[in-house]
Amino acid sequence: MKNFKVHDVEFRGRIERLTYTAADTEGKTVEKYVNVYLPYGYDDVPEKKYNVLYLMHGGGGNPDAWLDASPVKNELDHAFMEKEAEPFIVAFPTYYDRGAQTDRAVKEGFFDAEQVLFFQKELRTKVIPAVEKAVRSYAEDTTEEGLKASREHRAFGGFSMGGSTTWYAFLNNLDVIADFVPLSGDCWALEMTGGKTRPAETAAYLAEHVRNSGFTKDDFRIFAATGTEDIAFPNLTPQVEEMKKLPE
């Protein structure tokens, strides 16, 4: 933790755990959970609504990963206390379904990729409804219509494989999510590490998806980032550079 700057704060939010059931890749019903960060003062104004960020871990993680491995809660508390940002809710889910893990999938390196893609339906039909039924989000209800109507108040982000999950969320759930934060993870829609191996094609594929979905550049926002020393830098950077070249 010595590389992190941790701020002491006077007002602290809290973490609650929500459970839900979902079908795994073999069709079995499994119980999973989401950690939910509620900012300080959440209970003080019952009529106040909050934006929600869904934040995914990287490879090998779980819903506790962000909270265990980084001072994200402390930084959120500090940012809200100092009024650097309007308080929002953060939900920490997982794409993993360990019951579906096979030796071949792990050995050949496509287990995470399969799980990330499979998770997209679960995100839409299980995770978001479970969270937004329990908290005061902008969704009037968690029907398809309710989620679509409130998409401007919902974001999805993630680190590493969580970044790749974010690109899949963009491709599969753009109609219910408006903001995307892929960190150190490229889009694997065409092939694994496609942001590096096929950056121009990947960028074109993403743009075509937007057009086919009936959205324009003004209907969503992407905040992509990676560090120059990050192992993902050569994967994500070419893709982003090609995306910048596309006409608006």
Image: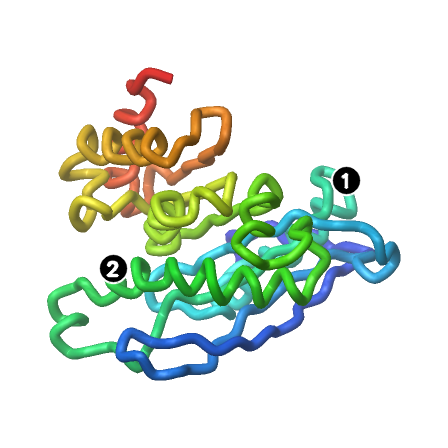
In the rendered structure, find residue 83 and report the number of the disc placed on it: 1
Label 1 crowd bin: few (<14), some (14–19), many (20+), radius 10 Å: few
Amino acid type of the residue that numbered disc 1 sits on in the rendered structure: Lys
Q: Mark 2 or mark 1, which has the lower sequence index?
A: 1
User: In this orientation, which residue lies closer to the viewer: 209 or 72?
Assistant: 209
Label 2 crowd bin: few (<14), some (14–19), many (20+), radius 10 Å: many
Q: Residue at x 33, y 22 (%)?
A: 244
Q: Residue at x 63, y 60 (%)?
A: 132
User: In this orientation, which residue lies closer to the viewer: 56 or 248?
Assistant: 248
Q: Where residue 127 sits in the image (x, y, percent)?
A: 51, 64
For the residues carrying marks 2 and 1, which lies nearer the camera in this image? 2
User: In this orientation, which residue lies closer to the viewer: 149 or 163?
Assistant: 149
Q: Where residue 179 sits in the image (x, y, percent)?
A: 51, 40
Q: Residue at x 52, y 54 (%)?
A: 144
Compared to 137, does 171 lie above or below? above
**Is residue 85 something one can see in this rendering?**
yes
Q: Where residue 186 sits in the image (x, y, percent)?
A: 29, 43
Amino acid type of the residue that numbered disc 2 sits on in the rendered structure: Ala
Q: Residue furthest right?
A: 44
> Circle 2 is placed at which residue position?
113
